[in-house]
């Protein structure tokens, strides 16, 4: 990667970035190849992860994967179908105990982010048989230890166009005792192959398409506006300590911007007509591309604030999002990320007005050189982008702020407290992560206040 030549020679080497691409197979019906993939790898025994809904469901998803495994003679596999939507410590521990007992040589995840993330954790802890969950969870919540052992090969088959988990080494869980989400982010956990089958989202509900698509939207927008890789933490003392989330960088930018443009174009079309196959296919690709973008650059404030929004919901508002077939309170991840988004980008816009202008142009379906965009002074870009994002969300039927999902002003301090420990993402937040000695408490309070309603 080319680095600014104005820096003295020794400093140039303090700002390196390491970009990991993803191994993806994209197309209609590609799920049926997965049995051959495992056969080609001489798999001894495969742990198949899914959730109870998918396990019951139609031919295009689970049955296709299972049929593909069964089609290979002598391919042994066992199925874990107890993955819960928005996994918790308890659900991870259950999956880990199962995986340790089964001792499989390979892993297959067929599902959304919850399934893929649970499979990653089960893989990690079946290699580290004696480790505790918190040994690898991001510091400061856990110890954030480096992963030095080689994990077992995991193939991921996403069934939502959302998390991009098939391209990343990230796995997220809800720490119920602390009422926020965090996770493990480490390249070692990345699937060896993502099988992106455009048939696999066709049976999703309209609500699921939208909430998953919102995750894609903000993965791309957050990674494009994260603190640049060459303005953040110093070079780690050992490459194994280099975080996966390194700040915006020229390679991640390409993936993030493509995903942003694609999502702004196709998600509203899916909301109007969930059977629009062309748009569904484009969103699957956008989810994976955004995954490559944020998997290397990182996400920041929308995600950081979303973790206590979803965690506290179980104690506080107990909001049950319509269209979700679960028996516990849930605000889907994509919606929790979207709720603070207008206020977040209003806050971050002054840090890089041109990047925010580019995003604004996409929402307005024009180019950054359009005089209506170039005429906006730097200090007004944030207000325009706030308005553009709010309109976009409103047209998709997203609740208009935190009040609409049951939060009140009295919850603001708890939401701030739940965001402060999300250092992994706050460190990438312009205006917070780059201000030495500040934990960003005042800014976060203002952003959350401004997210109550719009
Ligand atoms: Fe996300």
Image (cartoon, rainbow, N blue to C red):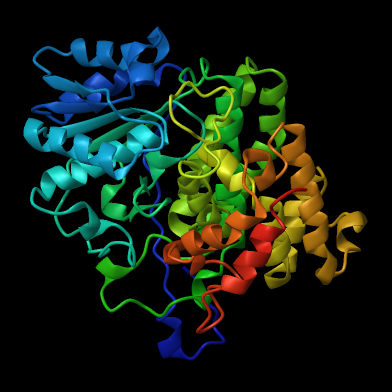
Q: Is residue 220 above or below residue 191?
A: below
Residue 433 percent across, percent down from the top left: 53, 73
Q: Residue at x 57, y 47 (%)?
A: 337
Determine which quarter of the picture holds residue 349: bottom right
Q: Is residue 169 above or below residue 266?
A: below
Q: Is residue 71 above or below residue 423?
A: above
Q: Residue at x 74, y 56 (%)?
A: 358
Q: Is residue 424 above or below residue 277?
A: below
Residue 420 percent across, percent down from the top left: 48, 66
Determine which quarter of the picture holds residue 215: top right
The answer to whether residue 371 is seen in the rendering is yes
Residue nearest the observer in this picture, 424 or 12 = 424
Q: Residue at x 61, y 30 (%)?
A: 210
Residue nearest the observer in this picture, 234 or 346 = 346
User: Relative to 125, is 388 on the left or the right?
Assistant: right
The answer to whether residue 431 is seen in the rendering is no
Q: How many marks?
A: 0
Residue nearest the observer in this picture, 108 or 366 = 108
The residue lying furthest to the front in this view is 410
Q: Residue at x 16, y 54 (%)?
A: 132
Residue 311 percent across, percent down from the top left: 45, 47
User: Relative to 332, is 156 on the left or the right?
Assistant: left
Residue 11 percent across, percent down from the top left: 44, 87
């Amino acid at each position: 990667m080319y680095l600014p030549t104005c820096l003295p020679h020794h400093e140039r080497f303090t700002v390196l970035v390491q970009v990991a691409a993803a191994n993806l197979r994209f197309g209609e019906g590609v799920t049926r190849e997965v049995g051959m993939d495992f056969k080609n790898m001489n798999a001894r025994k495969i742990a198949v992860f899914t959730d109870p809904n998918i396990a019951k469901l139609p031919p295009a998803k689970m049955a296709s994967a299972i049929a593909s495994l069964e089609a290979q003679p002598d391919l042994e596999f066992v199925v874990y179908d107890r993955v819960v939507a928005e996994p918790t410590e308890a659900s991870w521990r259950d999956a880990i105990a199962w995986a340790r007992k089964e001792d499989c040589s390979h892993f297959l995840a067929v599902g959304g982010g919850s399934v893929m993330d649970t499979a990653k954790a089960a893989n990690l802890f079946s290699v580290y048989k004696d480790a505790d969950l918190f040994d690898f969870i991001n510091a400061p919540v856990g110890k954030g230890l480096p992963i030095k052992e080689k994990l077992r090969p995991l193939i991921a088959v996403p069934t939502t166009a959302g998390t991009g988990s098939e391209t990343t080494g990230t796995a997220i869980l809800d720490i119920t005792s602390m009422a926020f989400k965090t996770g493990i982010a480490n390249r070692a956990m990345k699937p060896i192959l993502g099988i992106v089958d455009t048939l696999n989202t066709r049976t999703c509900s309209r609500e699921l398409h939208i909430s998953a698509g919102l995750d894609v939207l903000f993965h791309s927008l957050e990674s494009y506006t994260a603190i640049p890789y060459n303005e953040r933490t110093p070079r780690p003392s050992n490459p194994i300590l280099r975080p996966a989330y390194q700040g915006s960088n020229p390679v991640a930018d390409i993936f993030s911007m493509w995903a942003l443009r694609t999502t702004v174009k196709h998600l509203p079309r899916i909301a109007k007509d969930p059977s629009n196959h062309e748009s569904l296919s484009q969103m699957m690709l956008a989810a994976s591309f955004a995954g490559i973008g944020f998997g290397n650059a990182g996400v920041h404030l929308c995600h950081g604030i979303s973790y206590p929004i979803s965690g506290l919901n179980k104690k506080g508002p107990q909001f049950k999002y319509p269209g979700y077939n679960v028996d516990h309170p849930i605000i889907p991840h994509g919606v929790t990320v979207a709720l603070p988004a207008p206020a977040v980008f209003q806050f971050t816009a002054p840090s890089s007005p041109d990047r925010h202008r580019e995003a604004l142009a996409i929402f307005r379906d024009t180019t950054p050189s359009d005089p209506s965009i170039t005429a906006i002074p730097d200090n007004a870009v944030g207000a325009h982008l706030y308005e553009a994002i709010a309109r976009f969300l409103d047209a998709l039927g997203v609740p208009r702020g935190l009040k609409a999902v049951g939060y009140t002003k009295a919850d603001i301090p708890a939401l701030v407290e739940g965001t402060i420990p999300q250092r992994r993402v706050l460190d990438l937040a312009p205006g917070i992560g780059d201000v030495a000695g500040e934990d960003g408490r005042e800014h976060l309070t203002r952003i959350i206040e401004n997210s109550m309603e719009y």
